[in-house]
Amino acid sequence: MSNYSRDRNIYVKQFSKVKKWLNECIICQTIGYQPEMPENIAPGLLAQNIRKMFSPLNLALKLYCRILYKLANIDSLLCKTHKGLATTTNC
């Protein structure tokens, strides 16, 4: 893990409000901030720091980054039995 990744992880752990504004693609694990994040979040420079550390990341269906959504057949990732996301190979 690079120092940059480690710094981002430490920042997220220190400030729990950060998690609310982050998106993560469940396939490629890309993490970015929600583009609709407000300009300012109390306390202080939270929004500005998030924008410095992360890139904006739109998610399709609130799960997949748009690049993977377009490239992959997302329906093949859905568990037909449980009508939800297949999280294990047992589905």
Image (cartoon, helix red, strand yellow):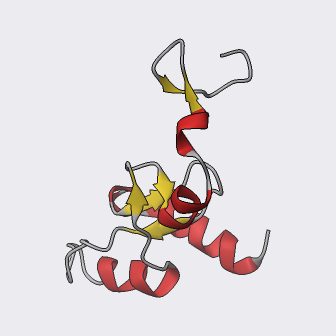
Q: Nearer the viewer, residue 5 or 27?
A: 27
- Residue at 61%, 60% in the rendered image: 71
Residue located farthest toward the top when viewing the structure as drawn: 81
Q: Nearer the viewer, residue 1 or 25?
A: 25
Q: Is 81 left or right of 7, judged from the image as shown?
A: left
Q: Quadrant of the N terminus?
A: bottom right
Q: Position of residue 26 (x, y in %)?
A: 57, 48
- Picture quadrant of residue 87: top right
- Residue at 65%, 57% in the rendered image: 28
Residue located farthest toward the right when viewing the structure as drawn: 1
Q: Is 16 left or right of 10, judged from the image as shown?
A: left
Q: Position of residue 69 (x, y in %)?
A: 52, 56
Q: Where 44 sits versus 5, above or below?
A: below
- Residue at 40%, 67% in the rendered image: 58
Q: Where 58 sits versus 63, above or below?
A: below
Q: Is 5 left or right of 79, judged from the image as shown?
A: right
Q: Where 9 sits versus 39, above or below?
A: above
- Picture quadrant of residue 68: bottom right
Q: Nearer the viewer, residue 61 or 12?
A: 61
- Residue at 58%, 72% in the rendered image: 8
